[in-house]
């Protein structure tokens, strides 16, 4: 049973002092039979009291307000957690029986919430890719693994090409992104086949094994498997999410699980830096790496277009002119 130490630092720097910063944090790790939280410490600038409640999806959510004028907001979450490998589903019932179970529960809470499909322009094109093979002969577990592999093989992992504002249409056109984007595409695919699927936020802790998503927050999808329950699938790394994945929260999509979000009074221009370090329980905490810096948000809410996206747009314009 691996033991991990995780430090998650979120830093907002404001161009001019701001005040009345009201924030929501979803940084409280899941504590269950497969993930035991040994310790969790939270430090916030100004030491405001944090009120914690459980949301509709069962996540612990904290809220706080920093009223005094400030040019920086620092949120540091430190946790120690032990994970336990979970057994994988056994195909001890026929595939058609499992699909019948999914059909019976599709209008029941909470599954109905995780079957709602987000429409985007590429939906029909994506549907066409799902017609390969005799899906009804596959179990939901096997199909989820196949879809996970499809996303892994058909989308390029390119940090910085997308932001939290990037839409499904943009992800589909780019065929590239990061773990959040991969998870959203997998959610669409699973829901198209009437498998309840939910977004998961957390961390990946392989400790320098070369897996994508190290040193940052991570995201994947969970599918509901009949006669088993919820099981995570990580399309960024083409694997089942197990003892190397530490869970924070679940929801329909990223907005339901956003680690930190809030509002404040003051100038709109600011910078967000996020830093995550992971070490095994018997090791010293790794030296902190350079933080992942989110571009300054302009008052209009737009983000700078990166060079790779500019290249793709230029190529598309050239093709249209030919």
Image (cartoon, helix red, strand yellow):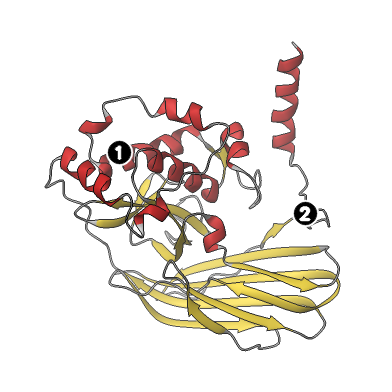
Measured along the vertical axis of the image, is residue 75 above or below residue 223? below
Measured along the vertical axis of the image, is residue 72 above or below residue 236? below
Residue 216 visible, this orientation:
no
Please identify the quadrant where the N terminus is shown: bottom left
Q: Secondary structure at mark 1?
A: helix
What is the crowding at mark 1: few (fewer than 14 residues within 10 Å), some, or many (at least 20)? Answer: some
Q: In this view of the protein, which residue sits in the foreground, 48 or 1?
A: 48
Instruction: Report the side of 48 relative to 62 (left or right).
Output: right
Residue at x 17%, y 38% (from the top left corner): 96
Read off the residue under disc 1.
143
Asked if the residue at tag 2 contacts the one at tag 1, i.e. Cβ–Cβ closer than 8 Å, the answer is: no
State the image quarter where residue 84 is shown. Answer: bottom left
Measured along the vertical axis of the image, is residue 65 above or below residue 92? below
Count of numbered circles on the image: 2
Residue at x 48%, y 32% (from the top left corner): 154
Residue at x 82%, y 55% (from the top left corner): 298
Residue at x 20%, y 32% (from the top left corner): 137
State the image quarter where residue 269 is shown. Answer: bottom right
Horizontal and vertical percent position of residue 188: 45, 42
Q: In this view of the protein, which residue sits in the foreground, 32 or 307?
A: 32
Q: Secondary structure at mark 2?
A: loop
Measured along the vertical axis of the image, is residue 189 above or below residue 159? above
Instruction: Report the side of 303 relative to 91 (left or right).
Output: right
Horizontal and vertical percent position of residue 161: 65, 43
State the image quarter where residue 80 is shown. Answer: bottom left
Identify the mark nearer the N-term, 1 or 2.
1
Read off the residue under disc 2.
301
């Amino acid at each position: 049973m691996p033991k991990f130490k995780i430090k998650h630092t979120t830093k907002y720097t404001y161009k001019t002092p701001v005040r009345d910063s009201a924030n929501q944090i979803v940084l409280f790790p899941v504590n269950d039979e497969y993930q035991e939280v040994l310790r969790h410490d939270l430090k916030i600038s100004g030491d405001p009291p944090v009120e914690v409640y459980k949301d509709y999806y069962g996540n612990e959510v904290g809220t706080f307000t920093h009223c005094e004028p400030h040019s920086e907001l620092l949120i540091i979450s430190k946790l120690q957690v032990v994970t336990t490998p979970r057994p994988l589903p056994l195909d001890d019932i026929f595939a058609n029986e499992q699909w019948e179970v999914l059909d019976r529960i599709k209008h029941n809470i909470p599954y109905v919430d995780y079957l709602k499909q987000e429409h985007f322009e590429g939906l029909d094109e994506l549907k066409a890719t799902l017609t390969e093979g005799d899906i009804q002969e596959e179990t939901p577990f096997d199909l989820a693994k196949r879809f996970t592999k499809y996303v892994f093989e058909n989308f390029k992992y390119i940090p910085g090409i997308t932001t939290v504002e990037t839409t499904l249409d943009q992800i589909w056109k780019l065929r590239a992104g990061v773990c959040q984007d991969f998870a959203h595409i997998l959610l669409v695919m699973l829901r198209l086949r009437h498998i309840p699927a939910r977004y998961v936020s957390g961390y990946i802790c392989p400790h320098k094994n070369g897996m994508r998503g190290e040193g940052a927050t991570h995201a994947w999808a969970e599918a509901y498997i009949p006669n088993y329950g919820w099981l995570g699938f990580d399309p960024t790394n083409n694997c089942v999410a197990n003892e190397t994945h530490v869970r924070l929260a679940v929801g329909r999509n990223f907005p339901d699980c956003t680690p930190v979000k809030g509002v404040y009074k003051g100038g709109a221009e600011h910078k967000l830096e996020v830093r995550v370090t992971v070490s095994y329980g018997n090791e010293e905490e790794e030296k902190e790496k350079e933080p992942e810096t989110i571009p300054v948000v302009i008052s209009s809410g737009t983000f700078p277009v990166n060079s790779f996206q500019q290249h793709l747009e230029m190529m598309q314009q050239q093709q249209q002119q030919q």
